Amino acid sequence: MGVSLMRALAEMTIASSIAILLVGAMRKPLRRVAGVQSACWLWLLVPALSLAVFLPAPPHQERILSNALPSSASEALSNAVALVSTGGTSTDYLNMGLVTWFLGVLVMSILLVLRQRAFVRSLGIMGCGPDGVFSSDAIVGPMVIGAWRARVIVPTDFESRYTYEERRLMLAHERAHLERGDALVNVIAAVWLCLFWFNPLLYWALRRLHLDQELACDALVVSLSIAEKRRYASALLKAQMPSESPWPIPVGCHWKSRHHLKERIAMLKYTSPGHVRRLSGVAFTVALTISGIYAVSFASGVALAEKPSSNSVDSTAKRITLDANDKNTREVIMMIADESSHNILVSDQVSGKVTVHLKDVPWTKALEIVALSQGLVTRQSGDITLVDVAH
């Protein structure tokens, strides 16, 4: 159980990191070409690729990609999988790693919950208007907080601080967050951060995700009118607090974003893309996600194919000496079976000859070497090892 969990964490971390780097490289170009909504959808690549490691790869994929990889890369991949699968050289290290991960998840979860509750308490007693919008003395700009019952909160002096047009635009922005389900997305992102607290790329990604959410809502509520864009930029400037915590609330959407204020105002200068370009952006995002899922399951299949069987990494496996000169491969495998007293089933399609000289090695390693030298694959079925040609 511990080995499986450690391996799943390692594979999901690698997959999500690759996805974050891809999104980071493409979000701005895609935003300019197809609009900010497409850039938001692009973030789905992160959970999609992470969960794709659990998808089974078609059997024929494993050998195809294994042959496509250089031998050194294939060997490195195999060694990495074996290292994760065995928890390194000691079970103690594996247990320490799992305990550290669990404690990190627990501490991060507690910190996020405490920060959320502290922020909500800082809002004080909130009044509720006839339109269902709450008000608080502690803020200067509107925001959305909560997830399952997300609600819009505005400053108590909202009507006197902002003009009618500014209020209309700001409320439309916050309601766009509600319609898009951004608060729920932030809950999922916060849970993801708790699980993978050790990945520094996630902290960078969350800030960019929040920015893309704000840009998407900006684009939804601002028309092509230059005057309206100016009013919107003015409202952005008015709503900035003198100081802002570098850690935003985990579950909520802020109108204020002083760190990215220039970028939000700069995006108002661009004309929204047409219908065709927006559809192209969605199609590109879907195609990229499907391709990424396929690639991850493809690579996972190779890792499983290259990974030694559970017996081959067992330090208690019987050690044998094998000496064969230009001998039939089937006979050599049977020699390994006899020496190890292990059940090995060899396919009728296995042929060829092999020369091998091994001294005092685990029988599982000997079988692995013979199989790899002849392009064979091994599979475990209970206490029987199956040896067959790669299809």
Image (tube, helix red, strand yellow):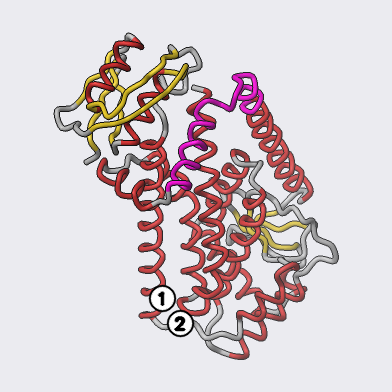
- Say few, some or many: other residues with alpha carbon within 10 Å of mark 2 (under 14 / 14 to 19 / 20 or more): some
Quarter location, residue 266: bottom right
In the displayed structure, 387 sits above or below 183; it is above
Question: For the residues marked 1 and 2, what is the alpha-carbon distance in whole angstroms?
Answer: 6 Å
- Say few, some or many: other residues with alpha carbon within 10 Å of mark 1 (under 14 / 14 to 19 / 20 or more): many
Residue 42: where, in percent of width, then height? Answer: 48, 62
Report if the CB atoms under discs 1 and 2 are less than 8 Å apart. Answer: yes
Point out the image quarter for the C terminus.
top left
SS at circle 2: loop
Write the start and end of the magenta stretch as one range.
Answer: 71-98
Quarter location, residue 131: bottom right
Q: Amino acid at mark 2?
A: Pro
Q: Residue at x 53, y 87 (%)?
A: 224
In the displayed structure, 294 sits above or below 367; it is below
Give the mark nearest the N terminus, 1 or 2: 2
Main SS, magenta residues: helix
Between 32 and 368, the one lying in front of the other is: 368
Between 4 and 194, the one lying in front of the other is: 4
Q: Label 2 belongs to which residue?
A: 273
SS at circle 1: helix
- Side of 244 relative to 269 (left or right): right
Taking the view exactly as shown, the residue that stands out farthest to the front is 325
Residue 341: where, in percent of width, then height? Answer: 32, 9
Q: Label 1 belongs to which residue?
A: 278
